[in-house]
């Protein structure tokens, strides 16, 4: 740098610039800590909602928020969609513990056990909900029960979303697995032998594979499949801190033996992830596909006639893995009664938009919607609605649930077995060891 | 940072002006009087101020705070901030996952560092030897380095895709069984290292190329006159002259590889069966997914200490040589 003042920058100029820069850095640091300024105009109450609907259902949620916002002109509703997965729950927990969370957020009900006890959430005021026409009677008892913690309502259920079976009606018919209505006959795919035979029949029709299951690099998919089938096989569990984890090892091993038979390269592809399975299913190269019902909009775009049923009864007890989206109230550092009142109104409005939500594939939790004739006419939604009646949720423990490290570790434990490198027992032993590890961890709440 | 108030006045708005003192006026900064020397020293502090403030706020304070947290049972949910002494460290040393994931990090470092140095050297030698169209080579070798990890993930994800991926299509075309590029425990880390080499080798290549261009031409001329052939010149002049830069590249590369996280987190998230999970992902999972910030901080410090020891061991002999 030149120290002289002839023409170019003087040292003083540079110094000034540097100090302004330093001030800017300090200022930027201070500002970064502030909440984003709300879009609320004068006199409007701002309500921010975080959701995790980064799939096809996200657009429908935006549509619902738009409708509710239009009906409540005094509220400025801001809806933010974040990518679903472990980072979503990290952000939500951090925002809550930092005291400046959004007014409401969407959460998987399976995560409630990890959130409510830690004081990250606030319970709902039942009287305020009743004033808006929302009462216990409007929900299925099992779902309402699941939303409770310590005798209070911590989650307002939005839907039940089961892990179901989609099918391609043409392939199903060609394979002789259709009922008189041309849709998949559930009896034709029940029982382990019945299901595998049906898979082979569909594989013969497609010339490739019969069943699509993208289990590679998808811990959640592995867990949903296992837990649903394990419940069908009558499996019970014990996950109590301070005691060893317990599973019905025989029942669990049978599930893995069935899955190993299924992933034989004919019934289902040996090495497939979610993208590949969906790609094959949508290009008519697979007859049946296991996926969450939230994939319905995507599959329907590819094939308007796509069919869907509850999970086939591969084992004896009817059971269908499911989770539930619910609205929660993250704990506010400085609660604002006006914002709270506005939040209740927005959430009540969103629940009543259930019909829009159902078009994304979800089964609305708010029963008055389900009973409407319009919902009863939705296909294939009504074909898999019975899944909600036999829904089996994640095991109860603070570390379980959607987007948890627990699901990742359970899927890790299954890897060698699903790849055919180890017997079914190996997966069970490894899962129990992992469960014991989680049980020994201190509850971070 | 130490700036005395006598010399600096802060004006509203964050700007600061320097009070006029004879010693500090521009143009008089000759190094003859003691006062002007001191004034220059002080202005030096001002120059480093922006850096010092940013470093302090975003590096020093969080690092020390992390050290404090490693002695507490702090949770991300805000609960638990009691001092628990060395409990976290004891747990870390007994936790098999710490050592397993540390081994994955080391294994990745070995798999990536060796080719990242050798391939870069070979590419630089080839380009320097005078391949036609030098700029095309320079650009295409360096271009991947400009991509962000997310773009690299997208590209490689579709190539490695199980069942319908590009690479498996090629493998099938020559009649082989498909390979679980990211889904086979024995293959996944090699795939990730391969992508990393393609992605970041350009930087090392550039460093080598610059060093090659700095070797005095006379040495080659003298050697040629003495009758040295191409290989002799390579082994007796070029490679010895590249020793310093190789040391630099090696250290930079080791540090970069030990920090591996992005590409693994996006491509396999540590799978299959945890076989690619690096220690940084374990720290991330412990702290941010399982909310155990205190314990995660302790593992970070164990890792930090190991790198520090490794660096010192590497550095001490180098000092002696110098």
Image (cartoon, helix red, strand yellow):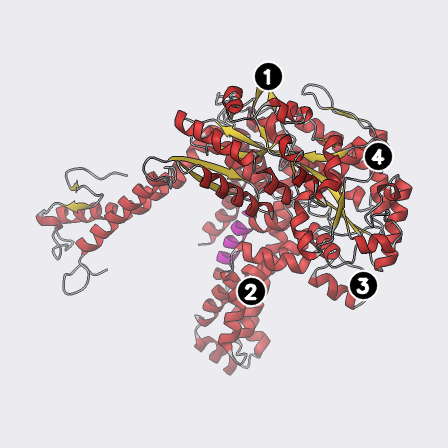
Question: Which of disc 2 and disc 3 is earlier in sequence?
Answer: 2
Q: Nearer the viewer, mark 2 or mark 4?
A: 4
Q: Nearer the viewer, mark 3 or mark 2?
A: 3
- Identify the residue position indicated by label 3 in the image: B176
Q: Residues within 10 Å of mark 1 (few under 14, many from 20)?
A: few
Q: Position of residue B203 (x, y in %)?
A: 50, 62
Find out whether residue A58 is within the magenta segment: no
User: Are the numbered discs 4 and 3 placed on the same chain, yes or no?
Assistant: no
User: Are the numbered discs 3 and 2 placed on the same chain, yes or no?
Assistant: yes
SS category of the residue bearing label 4: helix
Q: CA distance from mark 1 to mark 2?
A: 64 Å
Q: CA distance from mark 3 to mark 1?
A: 60 Å
- Identify the residue position indicated by label 1 in the image: A151
Q: CA distance from mark 4 to mark 1?
A: 37 Å
Residue positioned 55% across, 39% down in the render: A88
- Identify the residue position indicated by label 4 in the image: A253
Residue ranking furthest to the left: B22
Q: Position of residue A357 (x, y in %)?
A: 60, 41
Q: Residues within 10 Å of mark 2 (few under 14, many from 20)?
A: many
Which chain hosts label 2? Answer: B
The magenta segment is B246-261
- Marks counted in the figure total 4
User: Are the numbered discs 1 and 2 placed on the same chain, yes or no?
Assistant: no
- Identify the residue position indicated by label 2 in the image: B120
Find out whether residue B257 is within the magenta segment: yes
Which chain hosts label 1? Answer: A
SS category of the residue bearing label 2: helix
């Amino acid at each position: 740098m030149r120290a002289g003042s002839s023409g170019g920058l003087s040292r003083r100029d540079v110094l000034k610039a540097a100090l302004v820069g330093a001030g800017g850095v300090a200022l930027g640091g201070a500002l970064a800590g502030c909440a984003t300024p709300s879009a609320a105009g004068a006199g409007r109450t701002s309500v921010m909602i975080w959701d995790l609907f980064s799939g096809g259902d996200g657009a429908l949620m935006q549509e619902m928020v738009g409708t509710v916002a239009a009906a409540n002109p005094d509220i400025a509703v801001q809806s933010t969609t974040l990518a679903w997965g472990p980072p979503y729950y990290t952000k939500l927990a951090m925002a809550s513990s930092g005291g400046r969370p959004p007014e409401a957020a969407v959460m998987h009900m399976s995560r409630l056990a990890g959130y409510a006890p830690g004081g990250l959430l606030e319970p709902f005021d039942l009287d305020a909900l009743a004033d808006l026409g929302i009462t216990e009677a409007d929900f299925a008892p099992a779902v309402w029960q699941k939303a409770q913690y310590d005798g209070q309502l911590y989650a307002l259920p939005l839907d039940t979303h089961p892990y179901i079976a989609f099918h391609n009606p043409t392939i199903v018919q060609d394979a002789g697995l259709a009922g008189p209505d041309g849709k998949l006959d559930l009896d034709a795919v029940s029982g382990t032998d019945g299901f595998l035979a049906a898979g082979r029949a569909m594989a013969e029709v497609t010339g490739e594979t019969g069943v699509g299951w993208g289990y590679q690099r998808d811990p959640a998919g592995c867990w949903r499949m296992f837990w649903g089938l394990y419940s069908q096989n009558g499996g019970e569990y014990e996950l109590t801190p301070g005691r060893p984890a317990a599973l019905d090892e025989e029942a669990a091993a049978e599930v893995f033996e069935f899955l190993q038979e299924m992933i034989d390269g004919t019934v289902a592809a040996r090495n497939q992830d979610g993208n590949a399975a969906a790609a094959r299913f949508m290009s008519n190269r697979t007859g049946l596909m296991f996926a969450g019902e939230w994939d319905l909009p995507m599959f329907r775009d590819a094939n308007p006639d796509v069919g869907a049923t509850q999970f086939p009864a591969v084992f004896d007890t009817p059971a269908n893995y499911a989770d539930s989206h619910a609205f929660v109230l993250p704990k506010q550092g400085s609660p604002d009664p006006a914002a709270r009142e506005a939040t209740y109104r927005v959430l009540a409005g969103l629940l009543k938009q259930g019909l829009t939500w159902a078009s994304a594939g979800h089964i609305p939790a708010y029963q008055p919607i389900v009973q409407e004739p319009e919902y009863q006419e939705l296909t294939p939604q009504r074909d898999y609605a019975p899944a909600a009646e036999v829904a089996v949720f994640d095991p109860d423990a603070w570390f379980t649930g959607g987007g948890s490290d627990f699901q990742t570790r359970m899927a890790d434990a299954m890897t060698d077995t699903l790849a055919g490198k180890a017997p079914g027992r190996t997966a069970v032993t490894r899962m129990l060891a992992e469960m014991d590890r989680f049980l020994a961890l201190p509850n971070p709440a | 940072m130490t700036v005395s108030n006598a010399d600096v006045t802060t004006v509203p708005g964050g700007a600061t002006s320097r009070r006029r003192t004879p010693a500090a006026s521009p143009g008089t900064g000759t190094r003859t009087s003691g006062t002007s020397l001191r004034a220059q020293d002080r202005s030096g502090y001002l120059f480093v101020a922006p850096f010092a403030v940013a470093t302090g706020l975003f590096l020093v304070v969080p690092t020390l705070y992390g050290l404090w947290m490693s002695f507490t049972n702090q949770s991300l949910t805000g609960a638990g901030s009691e001092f628990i002494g060395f409990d976290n460290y004891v747990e870390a040393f007994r936790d098999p996952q710490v050592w397993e994931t540390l081994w994955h990090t080391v294994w990745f470092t070995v798999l990536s560092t060796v080719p990242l140095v050798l391939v870069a050297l070979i590419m630089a030698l080839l380009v320097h030897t005078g391949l036609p169209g030098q700029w095309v080579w320079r650009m295409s070798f360096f271009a991947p380095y400009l991509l962000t990890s997310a773009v690299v993930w997208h590209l490689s994800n579709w190539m490695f895709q199980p069942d319908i991926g590009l690479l498996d299509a090629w493998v099938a075309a020559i009649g082989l069984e498909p390979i679980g590029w990211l889904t086979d425990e024995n293959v996944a880390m090699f795939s990730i290292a391969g992508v990393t080499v393609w992605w970041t080798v350009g930087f090392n290549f550039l460093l080598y190329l610059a060093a090659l261009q700095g070797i005095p031409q006379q040495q080659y001329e003298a050697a040629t006159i003495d009758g040295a052939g191409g290989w002799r010149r390579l082994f007796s002049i070029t490679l010895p002259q590249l020793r310093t830069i190789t040391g630099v590249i090696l250290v930079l590369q080791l540090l970069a590889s030990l920090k591996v996280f992005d590409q693994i987190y996006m491509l396999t998230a540590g799978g299959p069966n945890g076989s690619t999970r690096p220690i940084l992902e374990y720290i991330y999972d412990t702290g941010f997914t399982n909310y155990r910030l205190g314990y995660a901080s302790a593992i970070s410090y164990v890792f930090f200490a190991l790198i520090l020891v490794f660096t010192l061991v590497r550095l001490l002999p180098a000092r002696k040589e110098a």
